[in-house]
Each structure stands twice: as C-alpha cells, then as structure tokens.
C-alpha cells in the first residue's frame, strides 16, 4: 500500500472526488500544490497512511498550503 495520497476535495461538500497514490511525501506535496494552482474549485489534501487509515497532513488551495 502507498505511504501517501493526494485527495481532490469538493469545497462545498468536503467530499473526496478522487485520489492519487504516492510513495513519498515530497512528490505528493508537489503534485497537490501544482494541481491546486490550476483548480480553484477544489482543495487538495496530502494524506499519510497510518495503519490503513489516512490522516491529512497538509491541504493546498489555490497553490497555498
């Protein structure tokens, strides 16, 4: 199982629309930041796998984390 994932979050309903898995934190944060710059309708959460439960460690909105 992947160590990290980036979730695209619907801002109005705070629901996960989809996610992309990553093996390291830097790649996940880079992807989330870049995606959030181009997409003002969603936030992007970097989440860490904590024994099959993902915990949000950083959120990006409009390129800001």
Image (tube, helix red, strand yellow):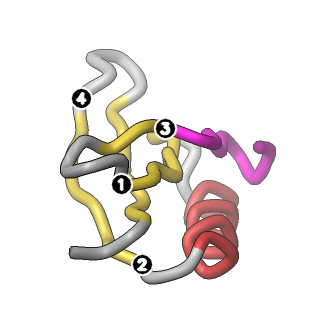
Q: Which mark is residue 57?
A: none
Tell me whether the residue at label 2 lies in contact with that at label 4, contact meaning CB atoms closer than 8 angstroms: no
**Residue at 61 percent of width and 81 percent of height:** 27
Q: Does residue 65 appear to the left or right of 53 in the view shown?
A: right
What is the CA distance from the residue labelled 2 to the residue labelled 4? 20 Å
Pick whichever of labels 4 and 1 is earlier in the sequence.
Answer: 4
User: Residue 54 or 62: which is nearer the viewer?
Assistant: 54
Q: Image quadrant for the C terminus? A: top right
**Residue 58 sits above or below residue 2 on the image:** above
Q: CA distance from mark 4 to mark 1?
A: 18 Å
How many C-alpha atoms fall within 10 Å of the one at disc 2: few (<14), some, or many (≥20)?
many
Residue at image coords 33%, 32%: 10
For residue 60, above or below residue 23? above
Which residue does the numbered mark 2 point to in the structure image? 22
Q: Is residue 52 visible?
A: yes
Reading the chain from its start, which is encountered first: label 4 or label 3? 4
x and y percentages locating residue 47 in the rendered image: 45, 49
Contact between marks 4 and 3 (CB within 8 A): the answer is no
Bounds of the magenta segment? 56-65
Identify the secondary structure beneath mark 3.
strand
The spot of residue 40 in percent (x, y) is: 57, 44
- Which residue: 65% across, 65% down? 29
Residue 35 image offset from top left, x and y in percent: 56, 65
Marks 3 and 2: in contact by CB < 8 Å? no
To which residue does mark 4 refer? Answer: 15
Of the image marks 2 and 4, the number of the one nearer the N terminus? 4
Instruction: Kindly report which numbered mark, 1 or 2, lies closer to the viewer in this rendering.
Output: 1
In the rendered image, the quadrant that contains the N terminus is bottom left
Check disc 1 and report the residue beneath it.
Answer: 49
Report the label total.
4
């Amino acid at each position: 199982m992947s160590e990290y994932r980036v979730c695209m979050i619907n801002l109005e309903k705070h629901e996960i629309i989809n996610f992309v898995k990553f093996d390291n934190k830097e790649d996940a944060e880079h992807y989330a930041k870049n995606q959030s710059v181009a997409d003002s309708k969603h936030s992007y959460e970097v989440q860490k796998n904590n024994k099959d439960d993902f915990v949000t460690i950083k959120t990006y909105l409009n390129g800001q984390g």
